Image (cartoon, rainbow, N blue to C red):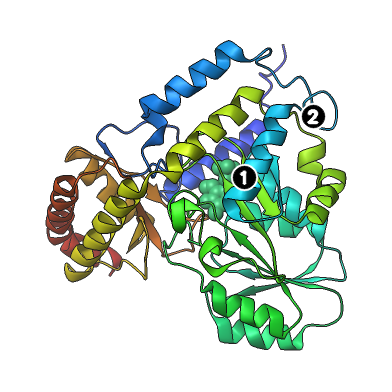
Amino acid sequence: MFDAFVNPTLRRLNTELAALQAKSQYRSLETVPGINLYSNDYLGLASDPRLKAALLRELHRIEQVGATGSRLLSGNSRYWEDLESELAAFTGAESALYFGSGYAANVGLLSALLRPEDTVFSDASNHASIIDGIRLSRASRVIFPHLDLNFLENALRAAGGGERIVVVESIFSMEGDRAPLVSLLGLAERYGASLIVDEAHATGVVGPQGRGLAAITGRPPALLATVHTAGKALAAAGAFVACSETLKHYLINRARTFIFSTALPPHMAAQVCAALRIAEQADAERAHLRVISRYLHSRLGEAGFDVGGSESQIIPVILGTNEYAVMFAEELSRAGFAIRPIRPPTVPDGKSRLRISLTSRITMDDVERLADCMTAVRERTAVTERSGRA
Ligand SMILES: Cc1ncc(COP(=O)(O)O)c(C=O)c1O
């Protein structure tokens, strides 16, 4: 008789998963009921009847519902080309190129652009897709402390040969604060560097008609590209790089996540187009979002929470340990607020948090109740947390 075979790889995976569980760092797929505080649907378009109706109209009109291949093979269509022209106009860029996701856009852009002799300067709070794109590129890298422009300037001054590319998010996904684009562009110009800005959390939300933060600062030559995701405020899927014609054609030839991946179905292009039109008109939703975000930030700050320097709809509530963040999220969920704790490796060790992500569907009443509830949970649990840590 043979002993039952235990697959050694699965055994190792089980050990690793058990270790994550022991550190309160184990993640599972769940849908948490309640008022949604962890959605990136900033303008509430995901359930907007106008967007659904537009998509249905297009589905009736469109000949095929599958892309059938990469854009370089059978996956191209006039839907994508028309959309890219609209996106270029929307961002004020010369051109735009659509990718299957924001992750693919950042990885494709950075890994194609950067050469081993170049140096990339990346903010320490940048998204995983930026980190992974940089890792793939083999360029020298300088990870500068979050928004520390003095550190960045010294590093730019000290950099060796090759090109210099600075990468930031315009609204940081975990901190909710803004990159000072004017100062960053000034530094880039002074040191002959280029700037790439990920506008994932600003697209649809910030700037005139939701065109992003770079639409406020303009697009001088030092601004090489902006990256805009469509899966958040635009309630669709995919992402686009807004850039020059030259960079677009370079990416079509060199960005592996663009070349070696099936295009999204053409009705997605139609959906993004429709979402863009609604988002452009959503000044009232943007104004409401600004009001409730500022109010919640100041209420939580006054109550003693560490809410960082958020200037947007993303409000981090930094709680410290994984266990405290998990427990806090569970308390809120019991009170009818849906939120998930954010733990390492998404954020640094000891900086576990709740990431409150407000949308225009949330009312001022909801925000009042949330602030009251969080204050009560804090008062009830702070003692336990302090003695737990001692
Ligand atoms: C700053 C940033 N960039 C890129 C992405 C990836 O976008 P996508 O979800 O479309 O892959 C995200 C997603 O959360 C993000 O927060």
Numbered label attached to residue 70:
2
Kindly identify the residue that appears in the image at 63 percent across and 39 percent down.
Answer: 12
State which tag comes first along the sequence, 1 or 2.
Answer: 2
- Near mark 2 (Cα within 10 A), the count class, few <14, some 14-19 or many ≥20, is some
SS for callout 2 = loop
Q: Quadrant of the N terminus?
A: top right
| Ligand 1 neighbours mark 1 (CB distance < 8 Å) | no
SS for callout 1 = helix
Q: Is residue 389 at all visible to an observer of this figure?
A: yes
Numbered label attached to residue 269:
none
Q: Is the C-beta separation of discs 1 and 2 under 8 Å?
A: no
Kindly identify the residue that appears in the image at 46 percent across and 40 percent down.
Answer: 27
Q: Looking at the image, is 245 positioned above or below residue 138? A: above
Q: Looking at the image, is 126 positioned above or below residue 205? A: below
Number of on-image labels: 2
Residue type marked 1: Leu
Residue closer to the observer: 116 or 340: 116
Q: Looking at the image, is 207 positioned above or below residue 25? A: below
Q: Which residue is mark 1?
A: 87
Q: In the shown orientation, is residue 112 left or right of residue 183? A: right
Q: In the figure, residue 187 lies in which quadrant?
A: bottom right
* Percent coordinates x, y for residue 247 in the rendering: 80, 55
Q: Quadrant of the C terminus?
A: bottom left
Which of pointers 1 and 2 indicates the residue nearer the eye? 1
Q: Is residue 136 at all visible to an observer of this figure?
A: no
